[in-house]
Image: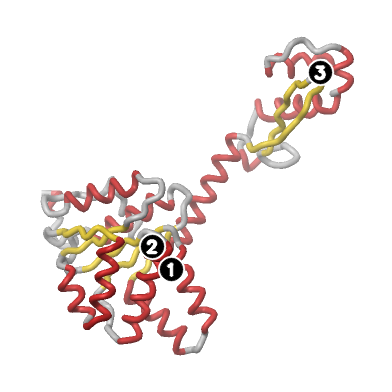
Amino acid sequence: MASSARTVAERRGWPTLTRDEIDGSAREIRELAEADGACDSCPGYGRCPLPVRGLVPTGRLIGGIIQVSYGPCEEAVRAGQAAREHDCLKGADLPDGTEHMTLDSYHPGPGTAAAFRFACKFCEQDEPRRGVVFAGSTGCGKTHLAVAILRHWVGRGRRGLFRSVPNLMEILRIAQFADDEERLWETLEILRLRPVLVLDDLGTEKVTDSRLERLFQIVNDRELAGQPLIVTCNYRRPAALAERLGGLAGERIVSRLRGICEWVEMDGPDGRVDRWWER
């Protein structure tokens, strides 16, 4: 015990322990010594031999008595962060085929540089309050930037969600047609409360009065909740999108989008067809 006590004391910068102090804290010294031995030859979080995996004791010498508290080790913290990132990425429901869509893999051109700068600036914020509408021609990288922002966000262990507007409208229609109020309410609550929400391809959905009502509700709820919204659409001018959506409802939706989002126009060749950056 004396040898263990000396080792424990030396590692923690304590003065020499007296025999009475060693006897009075025998259990604590033994626990600290066992944890030191396990951590010195750490086999990784998954094979941690401690009684509670990743939870290490920390000792403080107060008035000649060793007091022990517990906290996660660095391996446990890293494992927890990785698990949170995995859960957030899975929960974001990013579509297949978007794994390559990151800020690093984006190729900004003359007509998309401003959008790329905004995406980078957005990702630097801890609590973004204002969203963005990426508005431009087909294939210029709108979805790429929206996915890149969301992927960056969930990579920090934060919650987010990707939804294609046409698919989302169909999900809501089915729930409403089935008279499933609980499912409808749960879906709308998720859309309202996720810290970052991506609505992709706004304006390509079939327009009906009920769908416009739901779209307005989603955008309005995001505004009231103070949560950022990321939107992509093929209509560079707000008036053109409002006209596509139709009537007063379309104007109200676009008005709220302009109030809570930066409207960033994008222009360039269709990158799916013309991979200009490879020339």
Give how far across and how far down residue 48 sits, in percent: 67, 38
Q: Quadrant of the N terminus?
A: top right
Q: Secondary structure at mark 2?
A: strand
**Residue 15 versus residue 240 in the image, above or below:** above
Name the amino acid, label 3.
Gly
**Callout 1: 10 Å neighbours few (<14), some, many (20+)?**
many
Percent coordinates x, y for residue 216 in the rendering: 34, 75
- On the image, numbered disc 1 is attached to which residue? 191
Type of amino acid at the residue the image marks with label 1: Leu
Q: Tell me, yes or no, whether the two marked residues, 1 and 2, touch with CB atoms within 8 Å.
A: yes
Q: CA distance from mark 1 to mark 3?
A: 56 Å
From the image, tell me which residue sits under label 2. 197
Mark 3 vs mark 2, foreground winner is 3
Mark sitting on residue 64 = 3
Nearer to us in this view, 269 or 205: 205
Disc 2 crowd, CA 10 A, few/some/many (<14, 14-19, 20+): many
Displayed quadrant of residue 213: bottom left
